[in-house]
Amino acid sequence: MIKVLLADDHTLVRDGLRHILRSASGFDIAGEAWDAVTTIALVRNNDANVLVLDLSMPGRNGIELIKQIKDEKPSLRILVLTMHAEQQYAVRAFKAGASGYLTKESASTELVGAVTKVASGGVYISLSMAERFAQNLNEPVDALPHHKLSDREFDIFRRIVAGQSITEIANELCLSVKTVSTHKTRILEKMEMPNENALVRYAMRNKLIDDEDDL
């Protein structure tokens, strides 16, 4: 029996994941969480095999959350489940310690196989993401301006171009408005962009904004 933890801030998403896994055989849903704080508590209080983790929950940068979880529970396998199909998110997630990366649009058909693969010690990436990796094999490292950003900066960049205000970002990531403003300034400097509108245009041009962004 594979013991699974579910962490997503949307109740309907957790309900759907739970239904998919319970409809298959061999899975035990050992607990659920809805933000960074409850996710850490869930991980600490359960000896599970796999954590299915939404990359964009309130309270913490998703990449930083993966790093903390792997520090505290190195044996816990993490399957990232996210709306973000951008390659940089997947690369950063794997470097942080994730064992799998699955887009939510693929969950209905790939979740069972992904959790099984990750639980057995393997690495899983959704078919759509695998195609993106293959198409960009010859792309130079740090070829684009957003590749220069740190994990925290990249997360704030994505939230800015998705339309969130500095105050909203600060509240969701439990940071001060001043800290987020400082990050925004550094993002503009690193990417050599004059203002926020230029960031949005850049994100649209490089397909860094999902059709239905879910942050």
Image (spheres, grey):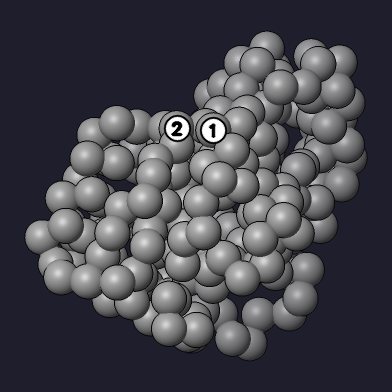
Kindly state the secondary structure of the residue where label 1 is placed. helix
Height in image: 164 above or below 212?
A: above
Seen at 77% across and 22% down, the residue is: 175
Kindly state the secondary structure of the residue where label 2 is placed. loop
Residue receiving disc 1 = 38
Q: Amino acid at mark 2?
A: Trp
Nearer the camera: disc 1 or disc 2: 1
Q: Label 1, label 2: how many angstroms apart (C-alpha)?
A: 6 Å
* Tags 1 and 2 touching, CB below 8 Å: yes
Q: Quadrant of residue 187?
A: top right
* Image label count: 2
Seen at 43% across and 83% down, the residue is: 120
Q: Position of residue 134 (x, y in %)?
A: 48, 85
Residue 22 or residue 47, whichever sits in front: 47
Residue projecting furthest to the left: 23
Seen at 37% across and 62% down, the residue is: 3
Residue 208 or residue 118, whichever sits in front: 118
Height in image: 162 above or below 107?
A: above
Q: Position of residue 76 (x, y in %)?
A: 56, 65
Q: Position of residue 196 (x, y in %)?
A: 69, 27
Q: Which mark is residue 34?
A: 2
**Side (left or right) of 213 relative to 152:** left
Q: Position of residue 135 (x, y in %)?
A: 48, 82
Height in image: 173 above or below 79?
A: above
Q: Quadrant of residue 153?
A: top right
Q: Amino acid at mark 1?
A: Thr
Seen at 66% across and 40% down, the residue is: 61
Q: Quarter of the image containing the N terminus?
A: bottom left
Few, some or many residues within 10 Å of mark 1 (<14, 14–19, 20+): some
